[in-house]
Amino acid sequence: MEYFLQQLINGVTLGSIYGLIAIGYTMVFGIIGMVNFAHGDVFMLSTFIALIFLLALTQVLGFGSLAVALFVVLLLGMLLTSLWAWAIERLASRAGDAGSAQQAGAVGLQRSDRADQQ
């Protein structure tokens, strides 16, 4: 029973992550009309930022309260990830008009996936 509950928690956690990513893709596609493939990279960067700051706060600086450390990590992760996403949007998304590098890359990836399936 313990194994089943652990697997149930793992499944709900992973499904929640997939759901958040799907909602993000849906929002981006609905707003700009194309899929942004950098979405997963930004989520990954956010996770690594949070991990590095959590380890730095608890191990190096010796924060005693885990709740305070998690709150600080949450704020720092959101701030740095939003700055990174802003930089991506400014440098890649607004680099040109409808024929921008991002859209060309998205179309290229979609076509290469279709070619692999045939």
Image: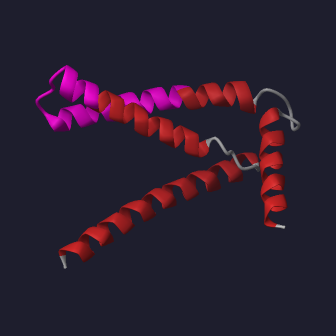
Front residue (pair 24, 14): 14
Quarter of image, res 23: bottom right
The x and y percentages for residue 78 are: 43, 33
Front residue (pair 23, 103): 103
Relative to 2, does residue 38 appear above or below in the rendering? Answer: above
Q: Report the predominant secondary structure element of the magenta stretch.
A: helix
Residue 60 seen anywhere in this rendered image of the structure? yes
Q: Is residue 95 magenta?
A: no
| Residue at the outermost top position | 61
Q: Residue at 46% across / 26% down in the picture?
A: 80
**For the C terminus, which image quadrant?**
bottom right
Q: Give the range drawn in magenta.
A: 55-83
Q: Residue at 74% across / 45% down in the picture?
A: 32
* Coloring basis for residues: secondary structure
Quarter of image, res 94: top right
**For the N terminus, which image quadrant?**
bottom left
| Residue at the outermost right position | 99
Quarter of image, res 39: top right
Residue 72 seen anywhere in this rendered image of the structure? no
In the shown orientation, is residue 97 left or right of residue 72?
right
The x and y percentages for residue 57 are: 23, 25
In the shown orientation, is residue 18 left or right of residue 111?
left
In the shown orientation, is residue 88 left or right of residue 113?
left
The x and y percentages for residue 2 are: 18, 74
The x and y percentages for residue 72 are: 28, 29
Front residue (pair 113, 66): 113
Q: Is residue 66 magenta?
A: yes
Q: Residue at 27% across / 30% down in the picture?
A: 55
